[in-house]
Image: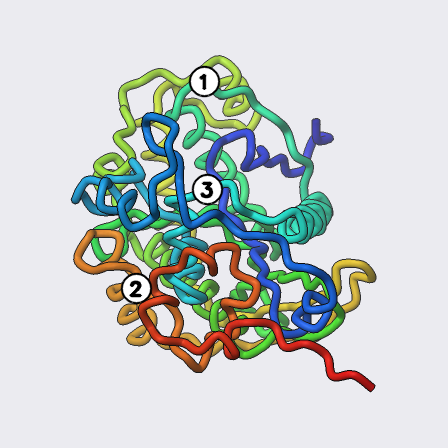
Amino acid sequence: MAEPGEEEAVSAEASGFSDLSDSEFLDLEDMQEASTSPSEPGPSSELPGKDGKLISLPKWKRGLDVSSPMERFCLKYLYVTDLSAQNWCEQQMAYGKELPGFLTPEKSAVLDTGASIHLARELEVHDLVTIPVTTKEDAWAIKFLNILSMIPTLQSEGRVREFPVFGEVEGVLLVGVIDELHYTAKGELELAELKTRRRPVLPLDAQKKKDCFQVSLYKYIFDAMVQGKVTPESLIHHTKLHPEKPLGPSVLRHARQGGFSVKSMGDLMELVFLSLTLSDLPIIDSLKIEYIHQETATVLGTEIVAFEEKEVRSKVQHYMAYWMGHREPQGVDVEEAWKCRTCSYADICEWRKGSGLPNSVLEPQAKKAK
């Protein structure tokens, strides 16, 4: 528990509301290392059927109902990182939803290390308190309580970390977690995103492009929240929350400790939306991405991101067309076919097979003999 006067936050894992804020991919920097050892097989091009017999992937896909991906995967909302994954390779993201469980141990280790670094930074500014939850209302209530405590902390101390954001974009609810918000020496509100790197080199432009889109989308949602463009009605519509439902005893106890007198989800929701619009929180002025080496914590470089609202909206509209079932998922262009070299789904990828990409482009290049 935090000492009196210190800010407390509840872990995202405890609330069931988290966003993968440190997603990494194996770039070309890892290609040579990967080419020196036998590659692990990806998912089979055949999948088990109802009777235990293997069926081909095309037949399995035809067996899916014709509903949209949002309906097929029973999703009430999307994470910001779902859309940034589309920016990297939409087909890969779709396979990740349809065929979960193929994340390699190597990539899992990268993500685990990145998460540990994020947690260490979060603990620098506040303690974490785990609150038991039993309902979706309790889970969202915890994030609302975090927002209520972070707003005055940001205004008085100038810095908060792991700030939850949510809002309807193109008819779909998007949620995420901003790594850090702080005021600069000029008094401007800056969003800072931390990205860790397994190797001490900056990412390729394709990775930077994905990261820039991610932080731009965070700004787009946050700005809408403080401008009153996000409504309780929209949130209730998408999440199916019950405003009249009483909050659990653990959540109520935590709310009282924070000085909030609430009984139901509706009470807390009203407080949150009033605080967002009446607290004089400004829109985000600048966006920054910081790349650090996982092992040494050395800062490798900083990327200043120019926010282009028209471009962000255009990309979101394109990506949402897939989620709403208006089009099939798309893979990478031939210029970025190198991404396929470390993709777990390369062996079954229908986009790769149908695009006519030469194997010489997709397979890791062997080192030349000296």
Mark 3 touching mark 1, by CB under 8 A? no
At 29% across and 52% down in the image, what residue appears?
A: 228
Within-10-Å neighbours for mark 1: few <14, some 14–19, many 20+: few
Spot the residue most to the top.
249
The structure residue drawn at horizontal position 44% and vertical position 36%, both measured from the top left corner, is: 144
Question: N-terminal of the two: label 2 or label 3?
Answer: 3
Foreground of the two, 284 or 354:
354
Q: Is residue 350 above or below residue 185?
A: above
For the N terminus, the image quarter is top right
Work out whether 267 lies above or below 282: above
Label placed on residue 134: 1
Task: Report, in whole angstroms, how far the alpha carbon at label 2 lies from the one at label 3.
Answer: 24 Å
Residue 348 rendering spot, x and y as whole percentages? 42, 55
Q: Is residue 251 left or right of residue 170?
A: right
Label 3 CA crowd tier, 10 Å (few <14, some 14–19, many 20+): few
Amino acid marked by disc 2: Val
Q: Farthest residue to the front: give it.
A: 53
Specify which label sits upstream in the sequence, 3 or 1: 3
Q: Mark 2: which secondary structure?
A: helix
**Mark found first going from the N terminus, 1 or 2:** 1
**Residue 292 percent across, percent down from the top left:** 71, 65
Say which quadrant the C terminus sits in: bottom right
The residue under label 3 is which amino acid type?
A: Pro
Residue 363 seen = yes
The residue carrying mark 3 is: 100
On the image, numbered disc 2 is attached to which residue? Answer: 316
Q: Residue 56, percent across and down?
A: 34, 46
Residue drawn at point x = 61 percent, y = 49 percent: 104
| Pointer 2 local density, CA inside 10 Å: few below 14, some 14–19, many at least 20 | some
The residue sitting at 70% across, 46% down in the picture is: 116
What amino acid does circle 1 point to? Thr
